[in-house]
Amino acid sequence: MFRYSKDRLGKIILYMATDGAMITLSLAVATSLWFEGTVPGSHALGAPEGAWTLFGVLAGAAVAVCFAVSWAFRLYNNLWKYASIDEVFKIFLATVITFLLIYAFNLAVLEENREVIFTRRLFFLAWLMFFVMYTFSRFGYRAVKRVFVYVGHVMSSKAGMRRVMVVGAGFAGYGVVRGMLSQTIRDKIPVIIVDDDASKNNTNIMGVRVLSQIDRITELCEKFRIDEIIIAKNAEREEDLRGIISQCTLTDCSVKILPPISDITGDGAIGAIAGKGAANAPMLRDLNISDLLFREEVTLDVKTIRDYLAGRVVMVTGGGGSIGSELCRQITAFGPERLIIFDNYEHNAFMLKHELIRRFGDKIRVSIRIGSVQDIGRLDQVFAEFEPHVIFHAAAHKHGPLMEENPGEAVKNNVFGAQNVLEAAHRFGAQKFVLLSTDKAVNPTSVMGTTKRITEILMQDIARVSNTKFMAVRFGNVLGSMGSILPLFQEQIEAGGPLTVTHRDIERYFMTIPEAVGLVLQAASLGKTGRIFVLDMGSPVKIDDLARNFVKLSGLRVGSDIEIAYTGLRPGEKLTEELFTEEERVGMQMTFHKKIFMTKPSEHDSARLKADMERLLEAATKRPDDLHAALKQIVPNFKEADNS
């Protein structure tokens, strides 16, 4: 037994009453038109009761058949607000079947009275009128609303509505336009749609003109007085989306973007605009700085990651930092037996633990151990207590210019601290050790980059004699990490500017923190000991472009609101970064994951390395003037950057 709310039941009764009136009216009008105002058997002025009685029987039967067929086709259960061409086809079939049954009733029952003959043509005329009335009764209010679209184009600027350009004339673009037009109270109106498909030029989507001039977005925004751009196009190539977003950021319009079509449906697009989409429909959102990286979505082989993390004791050094904390979040999702957060800063570690408990509850056991990687005794205590199976070493001093001013501390923490963790993992028989490295370790021009290159060498050296699988993962800058450029830009904007950029041509590789960490976990699943894995960082991004777009996305303008100041390269800073040396490029190997490459293991003289490390320790602790020479002894291609 179907149960309906009072409101829904009232609508069904209204539909049935309307349908009964419409089918009766269509039969009466068709009969009147066909017989020029009279019915056979009425003899014009004679007693018409018999003929009209037969018509009444026919009309009554027609109403009953109409109700039954409409119910069978579930036309009383539709939400007509979201109806499409499929419902029109159902109406067509339902009305055809209705009149076929009525005609069969006429042949079987009414034609016994030979004076009253309702012909097939009369029934066809009645069906045609009924089909039109039925369709209009369900879709008419939407057709009327379309009239206001055209009025809206004319009145939008006067009425205070935002004039919108939609980029993309596909299914997602249709959903966005439909969403805007379906709102009862509108604050925006679709004015123009642009697409790269020439076959759609000068066509219309729901009354909105389509132009195949996607390369002229800036001109069209000015011509049509556009206030807002909505990107609803799923570009097949990264370069296409890059071009679209670049054009949009050159305008004075606010820019919003719709998630990929794989993540959203047409109704989801409607909900994104109206703010009341399906529960799982992602919302239309503002363009953000991550979109300007034009990053391809990263897919991970979850099974291979779970195989080495689930049920294991996992330790993350520097676990309270930006990268370390994201490692802890993603590792926890794979169900380790225990997670150890090792950090020398208690506040971040404490807050992270409680965040993980809130998210995962009793499913995860988290332990915090405070300590420094430079303290061998403390490391031994923690390793003896938990005997971790997998170690991710993220603890390091990473601020390049600051480490130029404090090179001894960079060496003690990044080199000898890392060596302590490497040796502890070997002594306590860990299964896997993953060192997080950086692109600044390639042909280094800074102390920080050189220290990270030395840790890569130490990792490869110990991997030759240990049963533990040692590996390093090398990647570039991550957006939003502590000490990264975006928080600095945000502070400078809040202070009124200027935004400082060291050089107009300086460029860097960027990833989001979750993307980088996901690929680190994937690389660690490959199990090749002594290897350096290099993440595909995509195309480098100019910091100058990043700064200008950051100002734009903050709702400001470069020049009139915020200035950009060029301060000159800092000590140890390169114009461009590299992900691997020329020697590594020649020996580079692909892995099963298209975004992870693998270098061949390099050879080192262990005895000489040990002697060089002793000299480096003495320089870092006792003779700072010899420090650069000691670094260069281990990394011969270390040289000061040319900052002229």
Image: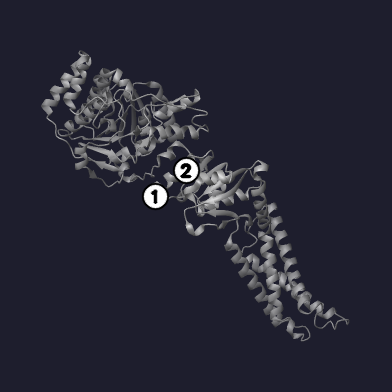
Indicate which disc residue 247 carries: 2
Q: Quadrant of the C terminus?
A: top left
Residue on which the image places disc 1: 237
Q: What is the CA distance from the residue labelled 2 to the residue labelled 1?
A: 16 Å
Residue 495 falls left or right of residue 154: left
Numbered disc 2: secondary structure: helix
**598 lies above or below 214:** above
Residue 224 position, x and y percent, is: 58, 46
Image position of 634 (left or right of 287): left
Specify which label sits upstream in the sequence, 2 or 1.
1
Where, by quadrant of the figure, is residue 308 drawn? Answer: top left
Which residue is nearer to you in this view: 590 or 165? 165
Give the residue at the far top of this rendering: 622
Q: Which amino acid type corresponds to the residue marked 1 in the rendered image? A: Arg
Instruction: From the image, state whether disc 2 or disc 1 is nearer to you.
Output: 2
Whether 581 is drawn above or below 349: the answer is below
* Nearest the eye: 95 or 636: 636
Residue 80: percent from left, percent from top? 63, 57
